[in-house]
Amino acid sequence: MLPRAGHPMTTDPVVPAGSAPYGGSMADNVTSLFRSTAAHSPSMAALAREGGDGTGPVDFCIPCNPYFPTPAMMDTMAARLKDIITYYPSSADTITAELCNLLQLPPQAVAMGNGSTELITWIDHLLVRESLAIPVPTFGRWTDQPMETGKRVDMFPLQESSGFALDLAQYAEFIRTRGTRVAVICNPNNPDGGFLHKHALVQFMDAMADLDLIIIDESFLEFADAESEPSVVQEAMIRPNVIVLRSLGKNFGLHGIRFGYMVANPSLAGRVRSMLPKWNLNAFAEYVVFMLKEHGAEYAQSLHQVRRDRLDMASQLSALPGLTVYPSQGNFLFVRLPVGAEGTVVRDRMLTEHRILVRECGNKIGSSSRFLRLVVRPQVDVRRLVSGLEQVLYGTRRGAAVPELAQGTSYSSGTAAVDRLVGQTNGAGMQDLAAMAVGGGGMGGGVG
């Protein structure tokens, strides 16, 4: 197994059930952070502050590569910290040119952003005119961002009965029926890790060639191993209406640096690039991009280890009674809790009793509090996770799940999209919303 950088918590013993390491009201402060957030979990910085000792929990929530950068790379960056944070970075064009040199892509077809969410924002403002379709559940910014700018969002519900797999033919029919002008596909999808093969995506692009825009979000594709060359970046560059979005922070284990990029034909890429500030990329992003050429082997090895860990973690979780683990090509696993278990209760107890942070998915449209997204981590951490889940879900006896909350809905009204949908349907549950979409009523938000 590769050495890991900056994770002192991974060798701690499991905290026995019933003892809260944060202690008393501190535990209440920590868990209350979840109720004050919207589409995402609290930041690790916020959790560390409320934890009292300045350290965060073992993180099964934030989908980050645990094996990269290597400890030696982290030491090198630490030694250069003063210079990195003191001086201006180079222009975005300079950093983009270096990334393109590594990726063997033409710079005129690439725009780099301060995280993929910056690019999603500009794509919405510049290229989405009236409506956007997206399968749900998915990454929350694909639903919330266009709603916030008054677009109609047509949500295509992925079915639990089919393992949340996206049927592209049905999705295309849904888009035609609704008259949607922009289509989004996340491959792999977040939170379930569902994967589509390249040939199927190319067929979809050809069939939807008349749309204003097709966006393929490949933020987690580096972790996939179902296909040797799964990306459609080459196809995007020769089509007039296709954008591929890629993340760097997730792959490189550096969420805090905030960098990602999009690939499209030069006209589309240029429109987005022209709106970005000259120094929208920070000096840490520049330093990492320029050091990558010396560490390609370590990066490839880190991805290989994550894929191996994913198989091991899925096997261990599948052995828990009543827990369903869905196939994933991301660096995370989507799991359904046993009957009777409520996700927010499980999340809070895992955090306060075992100092383990998990992602409860009740605030994702199309999901509910019965689902967790668990990030793939090394085996030592997974053993701690499984032990904690056994105690929280079953106590001393497997098969007796934690009780559901006495009151409340089966999902959290956390995102702007959920709030708007609940308001429009007088509080109808997610099943009613999904039925509306399947029946042609759609789950659109805003006006179009």
Image (cartoon, rainbow, N blue to C red):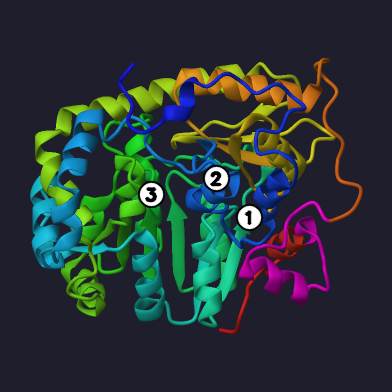
Cα–Cα span, label 1 and label 2: 9 Å
Under tag 1, what secondary structure? Answer: loop
Q: Dividing the image into 4 quarters, which one contains the C terminus?
A: bottom right
**Which disc is residue 191 wearing?**
2
What residue is at 8 percent from the left and 62 percent from the top?
A: 94
Which numbered disc, 1 or 2, marks the residue that appears first in the sequence? Answer: 2
Cβ atoms under marks 1 and 2 closer than 8 Å: yes
Which numbered disc, 3 or 2, marks the residue that appears first in the sequence? Answer: 2
x and y percent of residue 50 in the render? 59, 50
Cα–Cα span, label 3 and label 2: 19 Å
State which mark lies toward you, 3 or 1. 1
Q: Is residue 419 left or right of residue 84?
A: right
Camera sees residue 24: yes
Q: Dividing the image into 4 quarters, which one contains the N terminus?
A: top left
Q: Which residues are magenta?
A: 409-432
Which numbered disc, 3 or 1, marks the residue that appears first in the sequence? Answer: 3
> Which residue is the site of mark 3?
201
Q: Amino acid at mark 2?
A: Pro
Q: Relative to 258, does residue 388 appear above or below in the rendering?
A: above
Q: Amino acid at mark 1?
A: Lys
Is-magenta flag for residue 419? yes
x and y percent of residue 249 in the render? 33, 48
> Which residue is the site of mark 1?
364
What residue is at 48 percent from the left and 51 percent from the top?
A: 45
Under tag 3, what secondary structure? Answer: helix
